[in-house]
Amino acid sequence: MPETRARIGVFVCHCGKNIAGTVDVAKVAEQAARIPGVVYATHYEYMCSDPGQALLKRAIREHRLTGVVVAACSPTMHEDTFRKAAEEAGLNPYLVEIANIREQVSWVHSGPAATEKAVRVTRTMVAKVQGNRALRPAELGVVRRALVVGGGIAGIQAALDIANAGFDVILVERSPSIGGHMAQLSETFPTLDCSQCILTPKMVEVARHPRIRILAYSEVEEVSGFVGNYRVRIRKKPTFVDPSKCNLCGECARVCPVRVPNEFDRGLSTRTAIYIPFPQAIPSTYTLDVQNCLGILPLRCGKCAEVCEAKAIDFDMHEEILEEEVGAIVLATGYELYPKEAMAEYGYGTVPDVIDGLEFERLLSASGPTRGEIRRPSDGKVPKEVVFIQCSGSRDPEHHKPYCSKICCMYTAKHALLYRHAVPDGQAYVFYIDIRAGGKDYEEFVNRAMQEERILYIRGKVAKVFREGDKVVVWGVDTLTGKRVEVRADLVVLAQAVVPSPGTAELARKLRVACGSEGFLREAHPKLRPLEALTAGVFLAGAAQGPKDIPESVAQASGAAAKVIALLSAPKLAHAPEVAEVNEELCSGCGICAPQCPYGAISVDEVAHVNEILCEGCGTCVAACPSGAMTFRNVEDEQVLRMVRAALEVADVGV
Amino acid sequence: MSGFEPRVVAFLCRWCAAAGADLAGTNRLQYPPHAIPIRVNCSGRVEPQWVVEALKAGADGVLIGGCHPGDCHYVVGNYKTRRRVYLLRKVLEEMGIEPERVRLEWVSATEGGRFAQVMAEFVAELKRLGPLHEPGGPG
Ligand SMILES: Cc1cc2nc3c(=O)[nH]c(=O)nc-3n(C[C@H](O)[C@H](O)[C@H](O)COP(=O)(O)OP(=O)(O)OC[C@H]3O[C@@H](n4cnc5c(N)ncnc54)[C@H](O)[C@@H]3O)c2cc1C
Ligand code: SF4
Ligand code: SF4
Ligand code: FES
């Protein structure tokens, strides 16, 4: 029995006055010293300080301690500190436990009751340590390759950073080309440089990078495994065009009889069934959209194949399922705009001259459907009065999204300025709730727009937007003057709320990553771990984690990449050894435990086996096992029962 | 039942309830000191047997604190707990023990105030129920 040999040391920390001001620390030490098995007990002003740790180490050596309890602050604060110190003194770190007598005692109780509880909490942890075994973390290798999901600017940046550090990257993009929304933008705030001009070189760099493999028109089907050793199944849809043969002549698209709304222009133009989303697309090739193709059999159509001199069109191409191993995963699946149907009060989706911000970007773009001339969708007229409505669907907890979409104040100012450049005699109105321009040079940028002639900022909410003749009437209230405002506009642009990309929740489920209440991917800690998911080895970048502009997306992507690089550079990964374990003698092989495990860590043949690396240590299987065969290292049932008894002991606690 | 101070064991999941308890501390929210916390990885680790043993060993009540439904760090541990506690309370009832003595509460890491309130409520409830054991009984 371990307790007969046990030589436990107890160290009670004063934490200055934080503990000692409320709890009689000398008494706690004195009481601890009486517990059978405790051979040394003391108290000290700051256990976490260097002298405190030195005291701990000295005691471990001098008293040949086999277990340590530090009664101090929450284990989340200094468990590591004391375990490391113990290890330096030759004691296995898993034989060190913390009794939390600060957050859960001295800060929340007073009087003798506080001391009594401190004594009990300390005793409870002594009871635990007496049953602890020395453990060693399991070591596992790392597959030195990363997966990046989503090829927007965030995914591009992450892939480049990781690849430039010398690791292979698989970049999975759902659409036919990487680039994401940035490829659709005209010019970018606050500098007004052309979006495509700064994006294209990066896309080309990705395409040329020997360490990056782009899997476009592909999606992640399934993910299994764990940090350092993920196995991913990727479904690659057939494009029916061999990119190595396609010379981009475009003959196929010229003969294709099909016309469907062009997604890249957000439906403001049409495209053919065989198409390239935009000229700078990467992979640089055409894609045959089989859903809209009349039929690839010559009888049905097959015109594209007839004219393709490069013989690049291959109707036999099949969907491929690729199995890849990676050590780390970056999720950069970006955003979408709040759907049209949801904004009925603003006529969105019913009045053709009510459009969203990305549609306006396409109108502004020199390569867009109007070659950069601002022409409204209904009749192609140049709009002379344009109303921009900010916070459309944002900051409206009752009807729409409660949060601020963050980028709209900035891009609306940009839109108003660009509109004024394009239509010098035009008049712009901007309805806003208030302006949020907290970024470098952002305030100055918005001020520029506000001071510009013929851009009128109206503080207030729009109540209704409707069509009257060829005008779009906007009714609102100017909350500064209290007056009602009516604008008879030619075009209305809604700064629609930013929402997660469709499919984010599904992808998150596949990876066992959490989403917040609004569906954005959730970071491990909102302040201190913003770049990683709670699932080890999964990192977040860009607007998938929350509304973000380009500089922020790029910064987060580089940060996530740095984390990936650190992970992939580690010679070995350590996995906490406090996990489930099967006592094969007791196990009946009933298999009740296996389906309880959220991580698929248990396999059962004659008896159950726990994959130590997959086990995350929840203990659910242990509680489920009817035979008492499933146990948990250092939280054995017997240990817990001993803790319970120690906690409840009536014996005098001396206060 | 004047003068009766219930004895309580609180099994707290480290990700939510124990973190919520820590936050109550950081915010210096005072609450009754009766419960001795035992931190576990997940409320799903808590075995009905532990609860029964605690009641046998002298506890007047047992609290299990886990993450809110949908928030369990291990995805579904708390749903399993909910089911087990439900069954356990039925068994206790049959044994003539008030099921209210076993309480399952969801407390997130940000709910320090809620943790303190839960503690206060539970202790008040146990005071109302009175001791589970005869004086000089187990313990
Ligand atoms: C109207 C408007 C104007 C803007 N103007 C500016 C500006 O001037 N300056 C500025 O800094 N920012 C601007 N922004 C913001 C900018 O668009 C974003 O900051 C940026 O695009 C975010 O990049 P991202 O890579 O995170 O996401 P995205 O650009 O959304 O890219 C995500 C990519 O992931 C892919 N994807 C999604 N789901 C999956 C999946 N499950 N599997 C595989 N691939 C997937 C998508 O197809 C897409 O290619 C503007 C935004 C709007 C709406
Ligand atoms: S539940 Fe227990 S007895 Fe049944 S297979 Fe799992 S470990 Fe073995
Ligand atoms: S402790 Fe949890 S994660 Fe580990 S094997 Fe059991 S059920 Fe699975
Ligand atoms: S981790 Fe808190 S209940 Fe499962």
Image: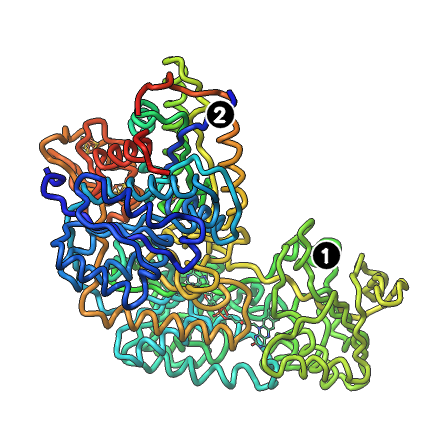
Residue A350 circle label:
1
Instruction: Respond whether the residues carrying marks 1 and 2 are from the same subunit.
Output: no
According to the picture, the residue beneath numbered tag 2 turns out to be: B3
Specify the quadrant that holds the C terminus of chain B: top left
Disc 1 versus disc 2: nearer the observer: 2
Q: Which mark is residue A4?
A: none
Amino acid bearing label 2: Gly
- Residues A465 and A110: in front is A110
Q: Establish whether ligand 4 lies closer than 8 Å to the Cβ of label 2.
A: no
Q: What residue is shown at x 32% (from left), y 66% (from top)?
A: A49
Q: Residues within 10 Å of mark 1 (few under 14, many from 20)?
A: some
Mark count:
2
* Ligand 4 position by quadrant: top left
Please tell me whether residue A364 is drawn above or below residue B111 in the rendered image: below
- Horizontally, is A21 left or right of A140 in the view? right
Residue B118 vertical position relative to residue A253 in the rendered view, above or below: above
Q: Position of residue A609 (x, y in %)?
A: 16, 41
Image spot of residue A350 (x, y percent): 72, 56
Place of residue A509 in the rendered image (x, y in percent of width and height, measured from the top left):
40, 50
A135 on left or right of A193: left
Tell me which amino acid carries mark 1: Thr
